[in-house]
Amino acid sequence: MRRNKNREETQQNWFAILGLVLLVVVLAGVVHLLYHAEFAETATPNDCFAAPASARATGETAVPKVVCLTFDDGPSAHTPEILAILEKEHVPATFFVCAQDANEAHMDKIADIAAAGHQLALHSATHQYSKIYRSTDAFWQDIKQLREALSPYVDADALTWLRFPGGSTNTVSHKYGGSGIMKRLKAQAEERGLHWIDWNVCAEDATASHPNAAQILRNIQRDAEGRDTCVVLLHDTKATGQTVKALPDIIAWFREQGYTFCTVSAMNDLQK
Ligand SMILES: [Zn+2]
């Protein structure tokens, strides 16, 4: 009898342990689902950085609100003004730079961007979709050309962040490299140890409608609504003087909303 009882107790213990294991597995599944529900909400799908589960979804209040200001297509004649505003406001930013003809006279500002402590990242040498998306080889050749153009000013081999021209979900590339080109490029970026990132807040400051500073701020406020993690797409070109004009107000608005500014790589480290 005693032996049977012991066996029963042992069996009960095993059932309890099994129950606990099942509970942990189910809970892990729920957390995973919540995470992906948040992730799926971003307008631009991006599996390169993890958006934290929102405070509202989990009922917690400790999730920090983070914003990354990102400037594409520079350097330009406006880079010094952008750097001056960022320095005055103590705001770090990320610059996805190019080496097109329009950038040529401003390449020395690459060193200024780095010296000010901002993150330098890769965008494209030529930024011509018909060239860079013709094939994966053509794309990486363009990135090699960009690194060469940057190398007099910074350690270009140390740059590990990339933004695909047109974003990782662009379809314009299909016309030149077929419908699978972005998928192949994303896989190859990973193989090369590169991180890539899109954006989920668009200033629309480089569109044909040429919005003024007030409209640029409104575009940002519209896209940032309800997001705890914002990656803001801005531009640093000859044509985006209104972006410079809007920048102090953009910074003030995110600050009022309780966001912390950081670079893209710092945000990625925060979310590990
Ligand atoms: Zn661009």
Image (cartoon, rainbow, N blue to C red):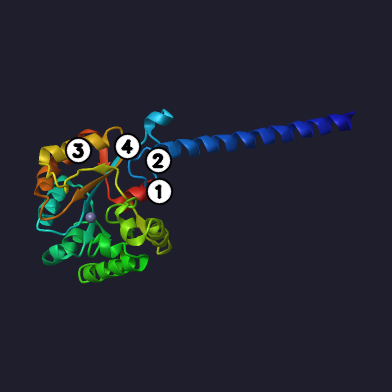
From the viewer's perspective, tell me whether residue 103 is left or right of residue 226: left
Residue type at tag 2:
Phe
Q: Nearer the viewer, mark 4 or mark 3?
A: 3
145 w.r.t. 29: above or below: below
Disc 2 and disc 3: Cα gap in Å? 21 Å
Nearer the observer: mark 4 or 2; the answer is 2
Local SS, label 3: helix
Residue 200 percent location from the top left of the image: 30, 43
Q: Any mark on residue 47, and which?
A: 1
Measured in 3D between alpha carbons, the distance from the residue under mark 2 to the one under mark 1, in whole angstroms, is 8 Å
Q: Check disc 3 and report the residue beneath it.
A: 219
> Residue 49, how many percent across, how many down?
38, 48
Residue 54 place in picture, x, y as percent: 38, 34
The reply to whether dot 2 and dot 1 touch (C-beta < 8 Å) is yes
Q: Is residue 248 above or below residue 83?
A: above
Q: First in sequence: mark 4 or mark 1?
A: 1
Residue 228 circle label? 4
Please tell me which residue is depicted at 23% across the width and 47% down the height of the picture: 233
Q: CA distance from mark 4 to mark 2?
A: 12 Å
What is the three-letter code of the residue carrying label 4?
Answer: Asp
